[in-house]
Image: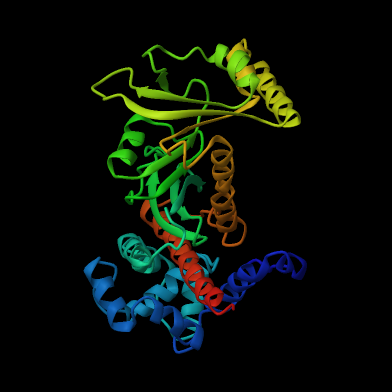
Amino acid sequence: MRQIESAELGQLGTAGRLRFKLRMTDLSLGPSSSAAWADIVGRLGGVEALDASARCYGAFQRARNIKSAVDLLQLVLAYGPGGRSLRMTAAEALLHGIADVSDVALLERFRRCPAWLTALCERVLAPLGDLPSGDGSPIHLIDGSRLEGPGRSCWRLHLCYAAGRQRIVDFAVTGLDQAEKLDRVAIRPGEIRIGDRAYPNPKALRAVRDAGADLLVRLTWKSLNLRDAAGQPLDWLALFTERAAAGRLDMPVTVHKARGAFEALPLRLVILPKPPEMAERARETSRRTAQKNQHKIDPRTIEAAGYLILLTSLDASAYPTDQLGTLYRVRWQIELAIKRLKSILRIDRLPAKDPELAKAWILAHLLFALLIDDAAAEMAAFFP
């Protein structure tokens, strides 16, 4: 396990120090009667609930070598966020009298855990769906991250992060064949779902609206087939050089799909100018990318680099153009959440080639992160 330097710990803040404390105590293999481990078991429903769920999902069938589902959970957390290899986990389990099992046997046991770990993650998240958000329309940030391991072990972690609660509220773990989409995780009526430039997809946009939620996504000029109020394709160069250049642009558009049946989706297109220094940096990046790829840069790309282009279903009277820009910038919260998963819990250091073992390793990290969020929320509730 990596030792966190005191200077680094000081920069983490209260929540970060709580994460550090939990990481250094709760994942130490030892007697399962310790107060820290008993707290984790309690948060997951207790010994009987863990045993029942492990049997239901096929993770634990009989008490052979590993005597209980609680012991199995402790071992998989020690292997995942605990940072141990299979061999080290097996050795420490024997040393502390938890289990007498080989690393190969552990591998086989852990391979049967993904469905169970998914269910445990969902158990931690389940109460959040019944709690009032306290912030009007819940703002849910959507993002994903690619996790690569040895060989061809590659996965995508999809997250939904509630800005008001400052915590993960939904997730999905998929292969790379499953792209990032706004509807990859369950949509809740009344929410505002925010995504970056990877998320403008006609069917997913339609799914969000049909579910009774609002959306706010960032675009490039070539992300979607958009048409103006007259049903004509947008002249992006004119929009940038003539209309947006004079100030902010806010106009109704409809989203269309080139092929297949798709009912036109009415939305708002908002174009906001970037600060001059940011615009110039973005243009220079576009030029370097074009030069590197040895292709001629499109004039629309150069012009678009100077603007923040947003597409939304939010009402203009309630969410004017300036407020949309501010709302979109809330996205940094989910980017920081993913960074914490990687830099503190090291969820991106995937060691396993076997697909089921790799998925168990990822889900063990995610479960631990959700438990940390749970504990942090309780601590925050004590503040006056």
Please give the name of the residue rendered at 26% of the width and 25% of the height, measured from the top-left corner: 263
Residue 140, percent across and down?
A: 45, 51
Please give the name of the residue rendered at 42% of the width and 53% of the height, measured from the top-left corner: 137
Work out whether residue 241 or residue 339 is closer to the camera in this orientation and state it. Answer: 241
- Judging from the image, the colouring scheme is rainbow
- Does the image show residue 100? no
Image mark count: 0
- Does the image show residue 196? yes
Instruction: Kindly indicate the quadrant of the structure image that contains residue 109.
Output: bottom left
Work out whether residue 359 or residue 142 is closer to the camera in this orientation and state it. Answer: 142
Please give the name of the residue rendered at 62% of the width and 27% of the height, measured from the top-left corner: 307
Residue 167, percent across and down?
A: 49, 61
Residue 187, percent across and down?
A: 33, 48
**Up-down relation of residue 47 to residue 244 (above or below):** below
Work out whether residue 49 or residue 69 is closer to the camera in this orientation and state it. Answer: 49
Instruction: Kindly indicate the quadrant of the structure image that contains residue 240.
Output: top right
Work out whether residue 75 or residue 155 is closer to the camera in this orientation and state it. Answer: 155
Please give the name of the residue rendered at 55% of the width and 77% of the height, measured from the top-left corner: 379
**Up-down relation of residue 298 to residue 213 (above or below):** above
For the N terminus, the image quarter is bottom right
Residue 293, percent across and down?
A: 62, 18
User: In the displayed structure, does residue 65 sit left or right of residue 316?
Assistant: left
Residue, far front: 317
User: In the displayed structure, does residue 323 sit left or right of residue 38?
Assistant: right
For the C terminus, the image quarter is bottom right
